[in-house]
Amino acid sequence: MPVDEGSDPGQNTPAERPGSAGPAVHVWATASPPCLPAEAAATVEAIVRAVHHGDDARIRILLAALVDIADTEVLLHLRERLRERPQ
């Protein structure tokens, strides 16, 4: 994940724009996965497994379930998990 100039990845703090009272952008630098609701996290992991196994039918079912529980944080986490190599 890109880190904005001024971010402190060790502290999970957003980049600060010099002379401003807040973050320059809403990009967070984190080394660990976000704290997700259990149902969303389980669905994300199931999607990742289905993608790695090429199970298109299961992927469609899981994505339909994710629609009702996902927010931006969940979708960004799914994207990151899908970019990782299977273990």
Image (cartoon, helix red, strand yellow):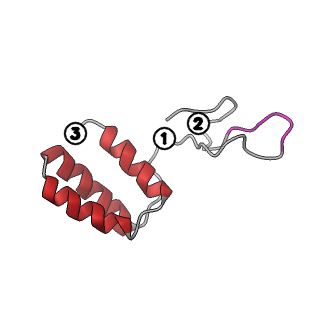
Q: Amino acid at mark 2?
A: Pro
7 or 75: nearer the viewer = 75
In three-dimensional space, the C-alpha distance between marks 1 and 2, rounded to whole angstroms, equals 7 Å
- Between label 3 and label 1, give the one nearer the viewer: 3
Question: Does 18 lie within the magenta span?
Answer: yes
Which structural element holds mark 1? loop
- Which sits earlier in the primary sequence, circle 3 or circle 1? 1
- Which sits earlier in the primary sequence, circle 2 or circle 3? 2
Residue 3: % across, % down: 58, 33
Judging by the rendered image, the residue that carries numbered circle 2 is: 9
* Residue shown at the point (60%, 42%) measured from the top left: 27
Residue 72: % across, % down: 49, 56
On screen, 73 above or below 79? below
* Contact, mark 1 vs mark 2 (Cβ under 8 Å): yes
What secondary structure is the magenta-colored segment mainly?
A: loop
Badge 3 density bin: few <14, some 14–19, many ≥20, Cα 10 Å: few
Q: Which mark is residue 31?
A: 1
Q: Image check: 27 left or right of 45?
A: right
Judging by the rendered image, the residue that carries numbered circle 3 is: 86
Q: Quadrant of the C terminus?
A: top left
* Residue shown at the point (14%, 58%) measured from the top left: 57
* Residue shown at the point (72%, 40%) measured from the top left: 24
* Residue bounds of the magenta highlight: 15-20
